[in-house]
Image (tube, grey):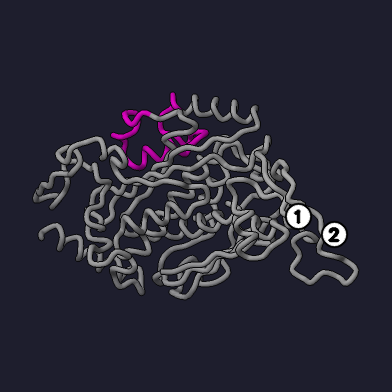
């Protein structure tokens, strides 16, 4: 499976094309729209979430609710486009209009954004040409693609969930959720204002977001994604670019504003001896091989172990501030406060939704690489046989 996304933040629409999905997989727009709505939720989102009500159109690759095996095209129309048609229009400028006359030009790069370096790389003097594509608006389509991947994984008995474990130094207590079943954890997260499974911590996170908003600043945090039901042996040790943890880490780090990633115990492993890090192996007739613990987060030697995959990512505070940092105007070279664009005081809850979907996409891609996946039923049969094989190995 491979995919591409296209579109600018204030352009007419966002588009994704997915190739390689098996035929005969159930897929509807409603399945995707439910996830897009979650991406727009969470305490701390800004005004744009009130403007854009993302709804997907499936314009190819699906007939009568089932995939065809041909490329699937997903489109999300930008409702705000009507206010940007002159600024972001595709057609050449009229002879009597100069580029410098176009409104909303940006020459003051924002610290922490792609503005300045992107302008240097592509030769743009109007930095709007950079920020329109580097904007986190692109994650709309990452979630849409991930929603398709999650539907694929559900057909194979694989579940995913994501939740917020930290915002602005306020951390959740694992004891509040670590014994929960996946379905119960998802219900708790979806009914929480910051997608946190610890109600006490959630209330303190909401207060921290409200406080930082009043000060014109922003907060970052940590999100955790769990994948349950993935068979062992997905990925490979034989080549560096086939290692599953490398693929998952890359997916997590590809999300806007993410600056760190860890699996299982993560960086705490540096503080512990090996006897408190590695997971002992056991076997039972009912379950086959399993680990007595899951400190490594469901991955060994670049491959899944069959235990839940547990991966966390850290998101930096959004760099667009309502009390902006200092910058330099690229035209005048004079110091200035950075340009203010519409922003959120905290987008960590939304980022957890994005993280779940990019991880789901990567797991789905890896499974399609491992098994013949022309049809959904054929793939189910093949994975079923494989699960029986590894159980009795």
Q: Which quadrant is home to the N terminus?
A: bottom left
Determine the CA span between mark 1 and mark 2: 15 Å
Quick one: quadrant of the C terminus? Answer: bottom left
Judge left or right: residue 190 versus residue 268: right
Mark 1: few/some/many CA within 10 Å (<14, 14-19, 20+) = few
Q: Please tell me whether mark 1 sits on a helix, a strand or a loop.
A: loop
Above or below — where is 76 with respect to 261?
Answer: below
Q: Give residue 101's mark.
A: 2
Q: Position of residue 129 (x, y in %)?
A: 68, 60
List x then y, in percent, for residue 6.
Answer: 59, 65
- Magenta range is 173-201
Q: Is residue 73 in the magenta section?
A: no
Image marks 1 and 2: residues in contact by CB distance under 8 Å? no
Q: How many marks?
A: 2
Badge 2 local density, few (<14 within 10 Å), some, or many (20+)?
few
Viewer-closest of 273 and 49: 273
Residue annotated with mark 1: 331
Which residue sits at x=36%, y=42%? 183
Q: For the residue labelled by badge 2, is the local secondary structure a helix, a strand or a loop?
A: helix
- Viewer-proximal residue, 284 or 103? 103
Q: Quadrant of residue 78?
A: bottom right
Q: Nearer the viewer, residue 380 or 214?
A: 214
Seen in the picture, residue 291 relative to 90 is either above or below; the reply is above
């Amino acid at each position: 499976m491979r995919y591409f996304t296209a579109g600018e933040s204030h352009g007419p629409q966002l588009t994704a094309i997915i190739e390689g999905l098996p035929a005969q997989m159930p897929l509807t727009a409603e399945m995707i729209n439910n996830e897009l709505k979650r991406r727009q939720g969470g305490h701390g989102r800004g005004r744009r979430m009130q403007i854009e009500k993302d709804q997907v159109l499936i314009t190819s690759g699906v007939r009568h609710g089932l995939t065809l095996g041909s490329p699937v095209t997903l489109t999300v129309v930008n409702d705000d486009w009507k206010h940007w048609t002159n600024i972001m229009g595709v057609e050449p400028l009229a002879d009597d209009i100069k580029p410098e006359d176009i409104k909303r030009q940006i020459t003051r790069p924002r610290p922490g954004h792609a503005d300045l370096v992107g302008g240097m790389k592509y030769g743009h003097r109007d930095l709007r040409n950079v920020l329109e594509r580097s904007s986190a608006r692109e994650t709309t389509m990452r979630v849409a693609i991930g929603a398709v991947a999650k539907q694929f994984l559900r057909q194979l008995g694989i579940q995913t969930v994501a939740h917020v474990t930290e915002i602005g130094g306020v951390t959740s207590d694992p004891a509040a959720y670590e014994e929960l079943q996946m379905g119960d954890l998802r219900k708790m997260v979806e009914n929480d204002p910051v997608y946190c499974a610890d109600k006490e911590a959630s209330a303190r996170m909401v207060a921290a977001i409200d406080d930082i908003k009043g000060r014109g600043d922003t907060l970052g945090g940590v999100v955790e994604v769990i994948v349950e039901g993935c068979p062992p042996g997905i990925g490979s040790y034989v080549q560096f670019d086939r290692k599953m943890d490398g693929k998952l880490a890359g997916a997590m780090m590809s999300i806007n504003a993410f600056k760190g990633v860890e699996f299982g115990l993560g960086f705490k492993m540096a503080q512990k001896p090996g006897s408190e890090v590695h997971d002992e192996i056991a076997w039972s007739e009912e379950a086959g091989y399993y680990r007595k613990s899951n400190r490594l987060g469901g991955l060994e030697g670049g491959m899944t172990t069959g235990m839940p995959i547990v991966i966390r990512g850290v998101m930096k505070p959004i760099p667009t501030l309502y009390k902006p940092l200092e910058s330099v105007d690229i035209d005048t070279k004079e110091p200035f406060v950075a340009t203010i664009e519409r922003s959120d005081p905290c987008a960590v809850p939304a980022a957890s939704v994005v993280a779940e979907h990019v991880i789901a996409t990567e797991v789905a891609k890896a499974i399609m690489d491992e098994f013949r996946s022309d049809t959904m039923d054929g793939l189910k049969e093949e994975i079923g046989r494989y699960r029986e094989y590894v159980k009795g190995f």
